[in-house]
Image (cartoon, rainbow, N blue to C red):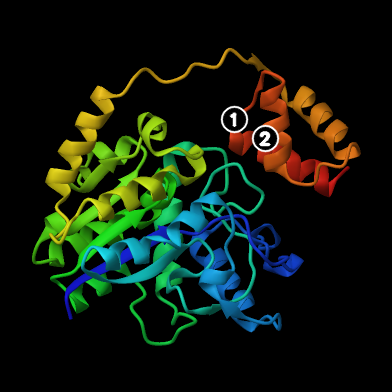
Amino acid sequence: MGKVLHIIASCTDRKHLPVPEALRLRCIRGAETEARANTWWQRLTSHKHPQGPAHQLYAGEHWSVVLGLSEAARENGFNSSLWIASAGYGLIPQEAQVRPYSATFARGQPDSVVRGSENKDTSEQLQRWWKTLSSHAGPAHGPPRTLHQLACAQPQANILIVASPLYVAAIADDLEFAAKDLQHPERLLVVSSPASLSKGTLAPHWIPSSAHHQQRLGGSRLGLHARVAREILQGARGSYLNATEVQVRYQKLIKKSGPLRQYNRQLMTDDEVRGFIRQVMDEGTKSWSAALKQLRARQFACEQHRFKSLFVQIQENP
């Protein structure tokens, strides 16, 4: 059977297929997390839109690198499987049949799981949402629905998480239970940006995926975590994963790297950003990522999630 490796990667907001309006989380009303999650699940599973393999649904730089991780793992002696940590479906294997949807754990988005402006309860909302989705039988009908179940089924496995801090926050409780049931807890690795969770109970498993690695690995920050994960697998060279050793190695790489590139860009108000978006839309720009690239090329600054949220607002209410 070889060395078992479960790769769990976060989903992406970019999809290859158009999303039906009814399968956008913004359409689910109500404030109570569990009730919203249950209503969402009922709608997602009863909708008539055709289904397809999950691994073919997602798009973008992060996902294109993720799809190559299994091959990198096999080349280094792992018997790997790819799973998706989905804000819409919960934990699903890559071959699960799913419908196009729009839901995210990121704050400030129209289809965000998080409701309200109080950041203090963000993690609680995310974890309750994940737990509620996990209580439903998944689209694949049979595979584990939680990371804890995955660890219990194969306690000698290696588990590699590739996700942003907010996605890790959603699965944090699940991860802690999984770590306790692994025979070798050091085989659980979480590749993500440094965050408050990286200093808590998940600290022994956290591999810092900071912008310092971008200078060495190339690509944009959207695909950085996946590129770090790929480098970890390529460096395994026949051994099991060991979070302690990998963590030390990547902390040293950060210390050795040069200073991060500083951008001297001019900040913009929301109204100024909206004006820019309308201008580039009139010129034919259709995606938020292309519009943001144009904005930054003109030496203006706007945080990615904020820009995307404003772009979507303009799309819906031009």
Q: How far separated are the C-alphas under marks 2 and 1?
A: 6 Å
Q: Amino acid at mark 2?
A: Phe
Q: Secondary structure at mark 2?
A: helix
Q: Secondary structure at mark 1?
A: loop
Residue 87 percent across, percent down from the top left:
50, 61
Please give the residue where the numbered disc 1 appears in the rendered image: 303
Circle 2 crowding by C-alpha within 10 Å: few under 14, some 14–19, many from 20 = many
Q: Residue furthest bottom?
A: 141
Q: Amino acid at mark 1?
A: Glu
Residue drawn at (57%, 63%) of the image? 58
**Which image quarter is the N terminus in?**
bottom left
Residue 3 percent across, percent down from the top left:
17, 71
Residue 169 percent across, percent down from the top left:
37, 49
- Asked which quadrant contains residue 206, the reply is top left
**Against 262, is 82 above or below?**
below
* 65 or 124: nearer the viewer: 65
Residue drawn at (50%, 51%) of the image? 62
Residue drawn at (19%, 75%) of the image? 152
- Asked which quadrant contains residue 13, the reply is bottom right
Q: How many marks?
A: 2
Residue 51 percent across, percent down from the top left:
62, 81
Relative horizontal placement of residue 197, taking residue 31 as reference (left or right)? left
Please give the residue where the numbered disc 2 appears in the rendered image: 307
